[in-house]
Image (cartoon, rainbow, N blue to C red):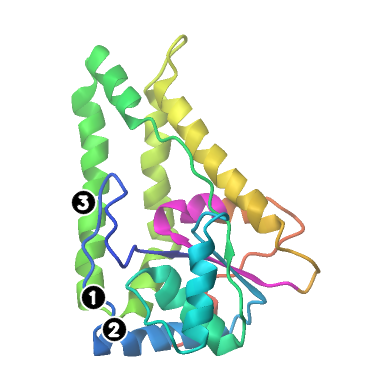
Amino acid sequence: MVLGTYHMANPGHDVYNMQADDVRAPKRQQELAELTDALAKFQPTKIAIEADPDDQTIGAALQDYLAGKHELSRNEIEQIGFRLAKQLGQKQLYPVDVKGEFPLQRVMDYAKAKDRSQELEKIMSSIGKSVAEEESYVKRHTILESLLYMNSPSSVAADNDFYMQTASFGEDGDYAGPDLLTDWYGRNIRIHSNILKLIASPGDRILVIYGAGHLGWLQENVKMDSNLCLRTLAEFVPNK
């Protein structure tokens, strides 16, 4: 299962960033417990997270949390990953992230040189509008409802549409848009490779917790592999 989520700690690393309320508030904590119960029904044997495999601080923080010596931060890795690991009796999370380039400026320079800036701005504004709509949705719904919305096929398709529209911004000698897509897919297929390394037996059930921008790409990687079976959050929330 690839679970796309919003960045609960507002790190501001994306082109457009949602401003999320504090998930440490009592109401949100109850909602996170509801989400964790739903994810536990998937019975994951391992939990993969959006973090650098060389980052030793996450493992140390998890051990402190399990020992009752660490208070969860706002980050979704802790609020979802740590919480679920404790509920399942697991003592380890698996960082699978890979850093990569995202040469958007090159696409913008190409669009300007070809008098297509207005066209690109229209595409970019649609992403900004989508993020604003998600922010509004999160404010009015529970965390579980919000993640069901973000992980719905229509939301995934809309997010992927932005990337594919950049493919037209290029030509022989300067494939700016296609090269951005190449870099983005390259990062995601490397992440997928790291996920595959976690599978030790046919019975392994891997939960991947990642920023929703990666969702469609990571899901497609799973779908195209005949050895894997993709599950979704919605399957484990029948009443929603």
Residue drawn at (70%, 56%) of the image = 196
**CA neighbours of label 2 inside 10 A, class few (<14), some (14 to 19), many (20+):** some
Task: Pinpoint residue 10: horizontal percent, then vertical percent.
Answer: 27, 61
Q: Which residue is mark 1?
A: 22
Q: Determine whether, in the image, residue 99 is placed left or right of residue 204.
A: left
Residue drawn at (53%, 52%) of the image = 97
Mark 3 is on which residue type? Lys
Looking at the image, is mark 3 or mark 2 nearer the viewer? 2
Task: Pinpoint residue 181: horizontal percent, then vertical percent.
Answer: 47, 34
Is any atom of residue 36 visible in this view?
A: yes
Quadrant for the N terminus in the image? bottom right
Q: Residue furthest right?
A: 201
Task: Pinpoint residue 57: horizontal percent, then vertical percent.
Answer: 48, 65
Q: Which circle marks residue 28 in the picture?
A: 2
Under circle 1, the secondary element is loop
Mark 1 is on which residue type? Asp
Mark 2 is on which residue type? Arg
Looking at the image, is mark 2 or mark 1 nearer the viewer? 1
**CA neighbours of label 3 inside 10 A, class few (<14), some (14 to 19), many (20+):** few
Residue drawn at (60%, 44%) of the image = 189
Q: Residue furthest top?
A: 173
Quadrant for the C terminus in the image? bottom left
Gap in Å between the C-alphas at discs 3 and 2? 25 Å
Q: Determine whether, in the image, residue 221 is placed left or right of residue 111.
A: right
- Residue 12 located within the stretch drawn in magenta: no
Q: Which residue is mark 3?
A: 129
Extent of the magenta region:
204-218
User: Is 231 rendered above or below residue 168?
Assistant: below
Q: Determine whether, in the image, residue 174 is placed left or right of residue 130.
A: right
